[in-house]
Image: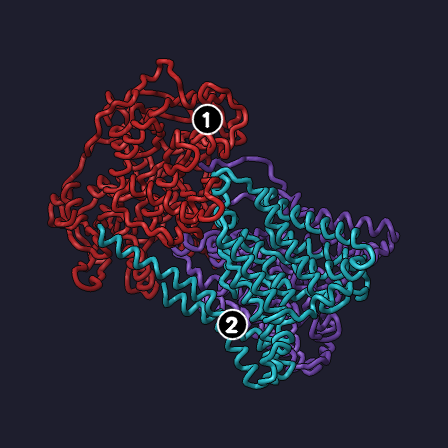
Amino acid sequence: MSAPTVVAPTVPALEPSPAFLDVRDVHKNYGAVHALRGVNFRIGPGEVVGLVGHNGAGKSTLMNVLAGTVQRSSGTFNLEAVDVTAWSPDRAQDYGLRCVFQELSLCANLDLAENTRIIHRPLRGPGWRKRAGAVILQTLDEIFPNHGVPVGVRVGDLPIGVRQMVEIARAFSVTDTSVRCVILDEPTSALGHEAAEQLLAYIRSAAERGIACILITHRLDEILAVCDRVVVMVDGQIVAERDAKRLSRAALVALMGSIEAPRERTIREDEPASRGPLVVDSPGRGAGDLSIEAALGEIIGFAGLEGHGQRERLRALYSTGRKRSAHGLAPPVAYVAGDRGSEGVFALWSVADNLTIRSVKALRRRGLISSKAERRLAQAWSDRLNVKTPSIDTPILSLSGGNQQKVLFARALASDAKVIFLDDPMRGVDVGTKQEVYQLIRSEAAKGRCFVWYTTELEELTNCERLYVFREGRAAVQLMGRQIEPSRILESSFGGGSD
Amino acid sequence: MTEAAMHRRVASRVPRLRDAVQVGLPVAALAIMLAIIFWIRPAAFSFFGFTLLFRFAIPLVFASLSQMLVIMLGDIDLSNGSFVGLTTCVTALYLENAPAEATLIYVVMIVAYAAFGVLIYVQRLPSIIVTLGMSFIWLGASIILLPSPGGSAPDWLSEFMSWRPPCLPLPIWIAILAAGVGHFFITRSSYGAVLRGAGANARAVERAGWSLIGIRAATYAAAGLLALLAGLTLTGLTTSGDPNVAPAYTLLSVGAVILGGGSFTGGMVSPVGAVIGALTLSLAGSLLSFLQVPPTWQIGAQGVILFLVLAGRALTAERTQ
Amino acid sequence: MSLAHPRVVIAPWTYGFIVALAMWIATTVYSGLGSAGSTLSAALAFGAFSVTVGTGQMLVIASGPGNIDLSVPSVMALAAYVSMTIMHESNSMTAPGLLAALAVGAVAGALNFLAITALRLPPIIATLAWSFVFQSFTFNFGGEATLKPPEILSWFAVWRVGGVQAMPVAVMILTLVMMIVLRRSVFGRQLLAAGQSERAADLAGVEVGRVRLTAYMLCGTAAALTGFLLSGFTGGAALNMGDTYLMESIAVVVLGGTSVAGGQANPLGIWGAALFFNLMATMLNTFHFEAGVRFLLTGVLIILIVAIAPRARGS
């Protein structure tokens, strides 16, 4: 990546200078929970600030307070040195403060022009649709050249990665008021590699034009590549502020309060001696599609660029596995969803209920579910995965995202499933949790379970023994053992010749 | 990359086809029904015949548009029918002799409608139960006003409803006008985009700085106004007030909206579709008597027609996916 | 970020009971202590029917957002007509009559579900369309005539054991069973999972289709049972016997604390709401309110109760 030489004002954290936004001693309480406890945060024009921290550290709350979508409980709020008491989303819009939220805030039933209209009041009257379409298309072209996004299509009909591109472009689009500051929460989580690079380059060039950016992401490399300053949050407080230029990845991780495990990767040789019976055996679908095989004791990975058919294939394998095991033809299967909110947690239930739902049939004693057996199972697995929760009766939604994800893992691991499908489950999960779960997956595989793992993060794939790299809906390449390394995976993802 | 882009542009036509099919099907159903009716009785193919066939579709068109606005917000309105009933009572009792009072009552009714819409949002109540409660309130109020059917519609209203405008029969004019105005406001205008957006993803619209309370109050008030128009036109047709004249409108209007391509997920509605759906549903009754279906099977046959049209939609949706 | 709002939650389903109690007291104060017992027993008897229909409706509503059964009244009438025709006022045919009624209900529920999945219709439309068809069946079965029940059924509907009405007690047992089913059976657990999130339930190994089919069939069966018993109680099957239960079955479920968003159900609360409905009718009658005022107050109270009751917060 070619980081452009920076001429923008790289303001050292402590020196006073005209700030665009300056908040002091901001608190936010949800009942007894303190999401923010005395945060001081400022950002100057043209500054790019990275905001990092574990899940539940308060990053999203801080973002929502800055955007006016959540009212602060106390604290002062200065906008260009003017004290603001009542801050709201529409005032934020007027001042050119825009947000890209993690759960996308596009309306799925509207097309691109209509979605653009929603945040731009001047887009009304005769011809508004044409103007709105031009505005969004122009910004898309600027940020993601060759994006190929069709304008007249409902957002709901677009793949998730494209939706994210649209959301980002909308935040940077301009009509009457100029954009002053954009807050981006995990903007690259659904973007492909190329689009992510394009975005980072654009953030830099926007900064040179005086647009401030706050970048929240778990991808620390992105922070180090693009930010002027890094702000680290732990437990609702800012614990460190550093100049990004003089910061290494390891130092940043240390600041976040967790030690990144050294990449102790045991490269197993291509001869899986312990290889058990084949439990996944799905022939390819048409030319150029490899047949997918997995045996007990194996961890196999699905790699490739976002949206090239990995998830569809994973779902298909899961549903055949389910049907076959229902007829006693194959061992039981389980699925760990990555999209916690809509496919994972049962929002009304406690940790225990969420954890045991996959196993209720096995917990029956004389026809009814045994409460005792159920609690025992829930407690045991919640302990094993080190789920941070006051008790197993706590509502699942009061846990942080990473801990909710652990419960979903526990749901699969506590079941009788021999084959476990992982659907990019670590998206947006903090580094510490990731390491814990990687270890658990490896130890469970050693005990004879089989994992089929789809992930968009290259590093994660190094946990796998065998990879299928997907391209245009097909499992195009198989990589094993020493072949599994980022450059090789990327090369196969792009199909060698293209680009 | 550019090839992929082209592919995406081509793929984008599929959803459009799907949208076209959703409005196209009720149109086809309407055309088929009319063809059958005219085949059996060619005399019906006249200015007068059309007027007779669609006379009672007029109030249902307005009621369906009213229901459509509520469904657009992701709610459902079970009070629609009894609100129409209340309107007929107020109209038949007061509109001729005390127009000022009648207008005042109308305004109060619409404000109440809007207030309930805001209440549903502010307290995050299930619309299904609040509008159920509202339906009892409208019904109670109309029975207090008019314990048994009676009163009389002002002459100008009855005369308007039997007016013979140039070119097309009145019901057709009204349907075209209502569909056109609805299409312009809801589907084409920039504010319509915001309203539909609020139905699908209220939070996103709120984050963009719009007042959801304002949006909901305005939409519910408009829904109340349309239901009021349904009541007025119905009074013009029946020339009297009756608290229990239109309980069927509640569910028929829901049927019309869904028939016309709407969905309960919020933000997915089509005013043109809803109008055509209303015409289809009100014509179904006439068709069955033209076909001499025995009275005991007529209701059931209406259910079957509903299934047939919607089944066509489900099948084509599968094809285009 | 979704942090929980821990706060004191007064169980919303108790509101029905509280209001019902208040109304009972008000009625008793107005018309003297002597009427207290008969007021309550009438409310319990009528309430039992609302509860039976409501319990079925609850299962459907809990099975996921948008799920609702509008065919309940037509199934009640159809099942009553079919069973009355089979029994033909003969006591010995009561068992076959009951079985026929239950079968009609189960088939009706299955048809509802089939229309929802095969034609991908919103449940509100699919069940509405079926209700039209069922109404036609009923028309052709019995015409306008009221079909009389066998004596034993009429006797059972008002049977008292030591002064206690048997039928409401039987329905209370049904409620108890339903509470256990929801909390401790695999079906109950999977129903509530499917109701919260269809996709999550599917990925957690729940056969969502099968669970919903069961819910609709149970709902149809409950409606059919109510139709059967109600014709014993009121002296026969009539075409419009179910009409008031369309809205009431939904109202008692929601006022009873079941969420229309799905995934959460409260069988006990239905009793509170059903008693509230019936006692309010009695109270307003006792106070000699005219029909219009009765409707108006009913509406206001429904809205007040849902507006005041604190709700469990889901996603």
Please give the chain letter of the residue carrying mark 2: B
Say which element carries label 1. Answer: strand
* Circle number at residue A36: 1
Q: In which quarter of the image is residue A168?
A: top left
Is B28 placed above or below A83 here? below
Chain C rendering hue: purple
Residue C293 point in image, percent of width and height: 80, 55
Is A50 placed above or below B132 here? above
Is A172 placed above or below B251 here? above
Q: The cyan chain is which one?
A: B
Mark 1 or 2, closer to the camera: 2
Please give the chain letter of the residue carrying mark 1: A
Residue C226 point in image, percent of width and height: 65, 68
Is C139 placed above or below A103 here? below
Quick check: can you spot residue B187?
Answer: yes
Q: Which amino acid does label 2 sit on?
A: Phe
Quick check: can you spot residue A377?
Answer: no
Q: In this view, does A300 lie to the left or right of C219?
A: left
Q: How is the image coloured?
A: by chain
Q: Which of B97 and B57 is in front in this view?
A: B97
Residue found 47% across the figure and 48% down from its top: A126
Tell me the residue that label 2 is attached to. B307
Say which element carries label 2. Answer: helix
Q: Which amino acid does label 1 sit on?
A: Leu
Q: Which of A307 and A383 is in front in this view?
A: A307
